[in-house]
Amino acid sequence: MAADAPRALEGVRIIEIAAGLSVAYAGKLLAQGGAEVIRIEPPEGDAIRLAGPFPGDEPDVDGGGQHAFLNGGKRSVALDVTSEGGAAVAADLIASADVLLTSWKTPSQLPLDDADTMRERFPDTLYVSISPFGRSGPYAGFEGDSHVIEALAGFSYVTGYPDREPVSLGVDTAEFLGGLYGWVTTLVLLNAKAHGEHHHHADIASYETAALTDDHNLAVYHGMGLLRRRFYSRVLGAYPSDIMRCRDGFVSVVPGAPDFATSLALLIDRPEMIDDPLLQLPKERVVRWQDFDALMEPWLMEHDAAEIVQKAQELRLAFAFVPDVADLAADEHLAARGFFEGPGGEPAVGPPVGLSETPLRPAAPPALGEANDELAGARGGSA
Amino acid sequence: MKPFDGLRVIDLSQVWAGPVAARVLADLGADVIKVERPTVPDRIRTAYIAQNDTTGNYWERAPYYTVRNVSKRGLALDLGSDEGIAILRGLLETADVLIESYTPRVLENFGLSWNDLKDQYPRLIMMSLCGYGQTGPRRNSPAFGMGMEPASGISSVSGYEGEPPLKSGNTWVDPFAGIHGLGGLLNALYHRERSGRGQQIDVSMQEGLLQLLGPHFHDYWMNGRLHPGSGNRREGLVRGIYPCAGEDDWIAISVRDEAEWAALAGATGNAAWLDDARLATMAGRHEQHDEIDAAIGEWTATRNKFAAMEELQAAGVPAGAVLNARELMQNEHLLARGLWDAQPVRGFATVPVQRYFPAHVDGEGYGARGPAPHIGEHTDEVLRELLGYDDAKIAELREAGVIDGEPEMLTPPESRAALIQPIDVFLESGSILEVDDQHLERMAAVVARIEADAG
């Protein structure tokens, strides 16, 4: 992408006070849009810097993978905001900014848990708080990471095997959702400000951002009183929907195609089955899902994922690979889109969405405190 | 006054991710016009019909459709006709945003791709959302959200230890991708304020989801390491989901640091852990995780999941009850924060509809503004208001089938029968816990609470 392309958020200044994954993700996406994001973090570095992964597992406050991914394009000011002096420096920075991004629970000498006082002290700065459960409600004082939040948000109950304990996904979905909504909320309110409408405070609960995505199970309960529970990788209500074994691994099998019966019969080399009710009638597949599996499994076990997916896609079936990270890193489609092209030629995870005029742009993460002299020097940034 | 009062959005998107992004703009004040072909409406209308009753105009009675489409206006338009395309182009003259979720070849065939539109509508922001994006060899591959979770590598890091990749049982990936697209669109709106120019937003569901694997990619690039599913366990944490008293009741616990570890030991009667040299570090605890889990499970097994959560949280241990959909709907915290709005599924009942923009802004929220439209419910009003058509012109278009028609694939008896969900099969398989025969009463109670809180 052109390095001289305009930046949508040019001139917007954001102060991020480090407060976990959600806040960092929101700040990263704002930085990708061209905002100046100044990250205030503890003098020894915050948990994201210390979380790794590190090359060769050697801890390095500037070299971690979480840090590279979540803090790209930001400035770093190392500052102890739990001290009076540090908080005073932070206050100057906040007063100079369009947006303050943190959690109301962040330990500090600033009144982050009191939106009214923050508004009085920083009348021109929008304060966006992202926390696990928000500032209000009976769980406001609760703590939780994605694992805990997803349990309360309905994810875990429907994920896993019916005869085993519920299981969390291997990614931090709820915390990313909190960060995603921190980004979107900030952008909504920046747009409002551009129309002369000023807002002062936004309170985002990662719990709510996760709960709202359980819209499948909620709608099924609302309409029919069904309480879905975990059932492998299958959704019986729209079968086939599963991760199925094939000769060299797994494929994702999903329903929906202009003519599912014909496409599927041709896929598995059984053209005589085009008119079979098991292929013709969606409900028949739901009722006789074990018969459907018995039809599919032998054919899948005789073929590799690459040929299955290619042939299925040619037949307009939305079957897909089940890649791991190594497969994805070598994927030719993603390579053709330049998705892993990092700022300095090294690989990086590309932006989540493409913009033709003002592309989001990945950038390198800052060394700890690299902006102290420039941005925090006058008031004693070492405080 | 809402942030997007005066903004107009033409929503050609279907099913899930696109409609959710459009709905957020509608809740925030935009005039969102949902365009459907009258003969082939949004296919989400056939998913999980209320009461499993597929008589009459059942396609207007799916809570599944409602939740993604409240706050919008409905326009019926046959995009397969020249007149339909001409009307759409007329509407684009009045619009700020176009949202669509076809594979790229579809709108190219209709002459409605970004390249076809950008010169005529220089202020237009067009958001195109599909599985793999607008460019690249897989651009035209069909995709659904339920397949994108595995296709994006999420399943490869999920599941029980030693077991195959696992897909979750909810479809969070659609809103996850749609809201990432919305963020791109909001960047574009902000840019247009200053530049006066629109642009194209290219949403690949896959690339949105790959964000979740960011640290995994770095570990692979740095160390060549992959992380197959390890159940609920994660290095550096003490974590699990433990059985509680009650049928299929569980609690999730996650301990991240020394203070939380000490709190867990104290709260569960395991103070001896703190003197156990084997458990002095997170690495040591990881090695002894089975033993720790057994002790936690013994403590949780006799307790109600909500009581255990309260007790652990009060002690400083991150813990959350595992909720099913009914418990989610009834959750005190979400009700207190106002996540749901009461909206009618006309012909069925008033249901709690979640907000897709849940932030509290200066103490206020942005919720659903009105029912999800019937097919073409606002066709006449939109054509009069935005294009200045008179009654005669509208009657002519109706006669010609441009703005009217029967959803022919949905009406035959066999289509109706096919959409009745075989609930007995779900019960027999164990894929549902139960059919709650009190669900209408429970929902009505929640709706009454929402309406009372809304004043």
Image: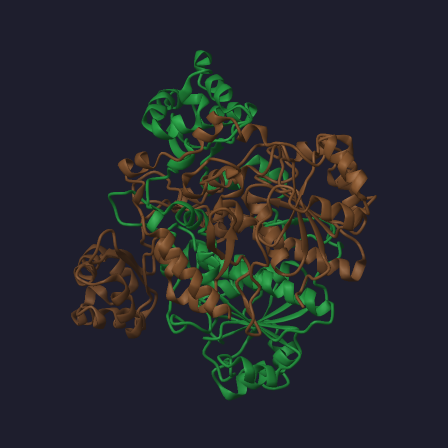
Foreground pick, B219 / B330: B330
Residue B237, given in percent of the width and then of the height, sits at 33, 61
Residue A351, given in percent of the width and then of the height, sits at 60, 51
Q: How many marks?
A: 0
Foreground pick, B341 / B190: B341
Q: Colour of chain B?
A: brown
Locate residue A244: give its quadrant.
top left
Q: Residue drawn 56% across and 33% down? A: B142
Rendered position, B415 above or below A195: above
B202 on left or right of B317: right
- What colour scheme does the image use? by chain
Foreground pick, A154 / A221: A221
Rendered position, B349 above or below A261: below
Q: Residue furthest top?
A: A272
Q: Residue drawn 31% across and 34% down? A: B425
B80 on left or right of B389: left
Q: Colour of chain A?
A: green
Q: Is residue B24 visible?
A: yes
Residue B171, given in percent of the width and then of the height, sits at 46, 46
Residue B364, given in percent of the width and then of the height, sits at 56, 71
A33 on left or right of B173: right
Q: Is residue A64 visible?
A: no
Rendered position, B259 above or below A10: below
